Amino acid sequence: MLKRLLARLFWAVSRWTLTAEATPVRPTILIGAPHTSNWDFVLMLAIAWRLDIEVHWLGKNSLFRGWRGPIMRSIGGIPVDRADPARVVNDVVAQVHSGSVFGLVITPDGTRGGNEYWKSGFYRIARETGMPVTLGFVDRTTMTTGLGPTLELTGDVAADMDRIRAFYADKAGLRPERRTTPRLREEQAAEDS
């Protein structure tokens, strides 16, 4: 209740416009891209709370230390131990099988600085769990943010990423100079072989 109230207040005073093609009705990987600013996190929470989507998001262990831990967990945070990434997939699979509807927010372009490739964890988790991928976005040029289409990944990495690239082609993020083109390292490896 408090989350929805905060979200309504945010959208009432925000210069941003919220758009959503559809609200997920089953567990989904919710891509947050382009991830170019810490404000992306605020927008993601405002979107989820306004649309009444239970969200979980992955964060580095250090975000959950001390007094921040309970706060981060209460807003959906899941600490990731980079030494044991398989545990995260197992936890997600267990939640999917429990029947709960949620969005697992992943920012595949990694940190807020422009990288050469997206991280492929979202793709692997989606394929291993059977979860679809919902394309969340931030676009400063139009001052819109929200949810785009939900895609079922086929296992054809290049074809799936072509669809994702097409959607994000005109999305700039808050800091366009930090934008990373949606491309997985695995695509480059396939082209080189």
Image (cartoon, rainbow, N blue to C red):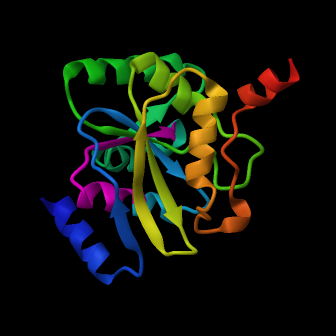
Residue 124, image quadrant:
top right
Of the pair 81 and 26, the residue shown nearer to us: 26
Q: Is residue 99 above or below residue 165?
A: above
Residue in the picture at 29% in, 50% down: 22
For residue 62, side relative to residue 114 (left or right): left
| Residue 65 in view here | no
Does residue 93 appear anywhere in the picture?
yes
Residue 36's place in the image compared with 92, above or below, is below
Quadrant (top left/top right/bottom left/bottom right) for the N terminus: bottom left
Q: Which residues are magenta?
A: 44-60
Tell whether position 50 is magenta: yes
Up the image or down, 98 lies above or below 188; here it is: above
Q: Quadrant of residue 179?
A: bottom right
Quadrant in which residue 112 is drawn = bottom right
The x and y percentages for residue 166 are: 60, 49
Q: Residue at x 39, y 21 (%)?
A: 130
* Percent position of residue 140, x then y: 55, 72
Viewer-proximal residue among 136 and 89: 136
- Give the residue drawn at x 21%, y 60%: 3
The magenta stretch spans residue 12: no
The quadrant in which the C terminus is found is top right
Identify the residue at horizontal 45%, vertical 58% (top origin).
Answer: 41
Query: Where's residue 17, x and y in %?
Result: 38, 73
